[in-house]
Amino acid sequence: MNEIESRLAALGTGIPEILLPRHGTEGSGIDLSKWAVIACDQFTQDLNYWEQVEKTVNGAPSCLNLVFPEVYLEAAQRDKGREDTGQKRIQNIRSSMESYIKEGIFDPPRRCCMYLERSTLLHPKRRGLMLLVDLEQYNWEGESRFLIRSTEGTIRERLPPRMEIRRGAPLELPHILLLIDDEEDSLIPSLGAIAQKHQPLYETSLMMNSGAVAGWTLETEEAWTVLADGLEALAGKSTTRYGGGSPSGGSSPSGGRPFLYAVGDGNHSLATAKAIWEEYKKNHIGEVSAEISARSHPARWALVEVENLYDPGINFEPIHRVVFGKEKPEQLVSDICRELSSLKEIKCIPDTKNSRILRMENLSHNIATASLQPLLDNFVKQKGYSIDYIHGEDEVFRLVSDSVQPAAGLILPPVQKEGLFKTVAATGPLPRKSFSMGEAEEKRFYLECRRLFG
């Protein structure tokens, strides 16, 4: 490990070995428009979306065969007998990973970070960096004061099925998005200027009206030095903005450390990676001790995309709620209004177009979920109801209208991204599903891979 890599490692950051499917022009290689698939935690109540994805892929090599869309995961948990879900699907994922490696689907690995540009129907450009983060510098439990911090609560019960997929998997595919707090918006654009001195390593359209993405390599010491300089500067600023310590772990009067990365998307995926690493260490105490000290074991790291909180291509969107009950929809809406009437921070306003939709008006400066979610959790637990978390108002209206089960939609107010780091540093993670980075179609697509186990 040279000096630049050591500086990055002190900041919980590493240089990955990126695996991309062999691809080319004029029909040669893998079709990246079929290879790239949206994050598995999207469209969780829209089976038709994922059926359309399968039709689009049409048997071609695709990340669809390497991930477990949560629309099927939920079905597997409800119906243990379905052959296309549960353990059988996990086995198929594992066998697809192994066969893709053996069959030469991938080009040789490239040891590099990557600069990415994503376009969508709503934003012409969103910029990001692909790199590794050190799971020893992250902890989602308790009041974390690590370099990498969760912005939302983690549901422990959601980890086991995700751990089963990752445990021993030969490949890692990330949909994790981490945020940096770069008000000047200088670091990622400066790396983009370096990267775009040469042609992109890949560029492709994305299926289902999700725009396009292109990626350039950052594999020179010049680029890595700019990255290290920029991250060190951000880590240093965090000690005065939020109360922290030195990047190497020294303490400040507040007893904390720098706050460099905030989890913007994929919170449960990063928590799963952490859980598998802790499990692996526990089961291989003597075997991995040298690798742990050398930071060399692949499972210690997670492949992520890093974006700037202040990137013009990032909007924070609320994640709405749909409550599924057992009573008539009118009674369900009435019960929810009665339950939420004690909240001083939030006002419930019936939607003028659909009586089964409630709009939440925020009467305070706090994020609405801080007070709303605990009451909702208590309500559904007492009644034996369930909640789903939905991106986009249109999807809430569709789901409430089409649901066979009585359902009521809660439309949450807009979320302000300014102050996110400071709030999380002061109070810890927000309630789960408090915000979304953009609309559902703008979510990260699986595309880049990395060898994990084996």
Image: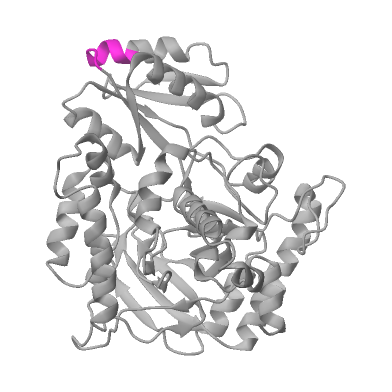
Q: Is residue 412 magenta?
A: no
Task: State which quadrant residue 391 falls in.
Answer: top left
> Relative to 90, is 311 on the left or the right?
right
Does residue 427 appear in the picture of this structure?
Answer: yes
Q: Is residue 170 above or below residue 108?
A: above
Location of residue 247 in the rendering, given as x and y in whole percent from the top left corner: 76, 63
User: Which residue extends farthest right?
Assistant: 253
Does residue 310 appear in the picture of this structure?
Answer: no
Instruction: Report the span colored magenta.
Output: 326-333
Residue at the image position 27 percent from the left and 40 percent from the top: 74
Residue at the image position 57 percent from the left and 45 percent from the top: 151
Overall secondary structure of the magenta section: helix
Residue at the image position 26 percent from the left and 38 percent from the top: 77
Location of residue 453 in the rendering, given as x and y in whole percent from the top left corner: 42, 69
Q: Is residue 419 above or below residue 321?
A: below
Report the front residue among 388 and 441. 388
Residue at the image position 23 percent from the left and 42 percent from the top: 76
